[in-house]
């Protein structure tokens, strides 16, 4: 997942402002008790941050593959 795909997926799933707030403020245990922004700054891949955010926010599995991308389970 590229950075642009990550940002688009977050904005589409949560909205521009709420998505930015989640990345800035929400501490996620699966990211080492860091926020999404902190994890990204520490070098955690965007895909790992996306999946951890989705799990924490209880995004349905069918929407976790990322907005605008093919569902990897259907390949």
Image (cartoon, rainbow, N blue to C red):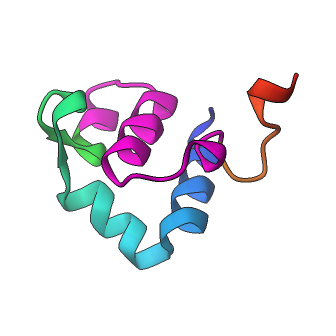
Q: Is 59 displayed left or right of 67 in the figure? A: left
Image quarter where the N terminus lies is top right
- Residue occupying image coordinates x 40% and y 77%: 17
Q: x, y (%) of residue 7? A: 54, 54
Q: x, y (%) of residue 62? A: 65, 45
- Please say if 18 is above or below 50: below
- Residue occupying image coordinates x 30% and y 61%: 22
State the residue in front, 54 or 26.
Answer: 54
Q: How many marks?
A: 0
- Residue occupying image coordinates x 38% and y 42%: 55
Q: Residue extending furthest left?
A: 33
- Please say if 15 is above or below 2: below
Magenta-highlighted residues: 39-65
Q: Is 68 displayed left or right of 25 in the figure? A: right
Q: x, y (%) of residue 69? A: 78, 43
Q: Quadrant of residue 20?
A: bottom left
- Residue occupying image coordinates x 24% and y 29%: 30
Q: Residue 69 in magenta?
A: no
State the residue in front, 61 or 26.
Answer: 61
Q: x, y (%) of residue 8? A: 62, 58
Magenta stretch, main secondary structure, is helix
- Please say if 32 is above or below 64: above
Q: Residue 40 in magenta?
A: yes
């Amino acid at each position: 997942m590229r950075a642009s795909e990550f940002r688009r997926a977050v904005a589409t799933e949560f909205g521009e402002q709420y998505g930015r707030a989640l990345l800035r403020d929400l501490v996620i245990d699966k990211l080492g008790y860091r926020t999404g922004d902190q994890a990204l700054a520490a070098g955690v891949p965007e895909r790992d941050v996306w999946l951890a955010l989705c799990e924490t926010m209880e995004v349905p599995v069918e929407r976790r593959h990322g907005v605008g991308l093919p569902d990897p389970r259907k390949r």
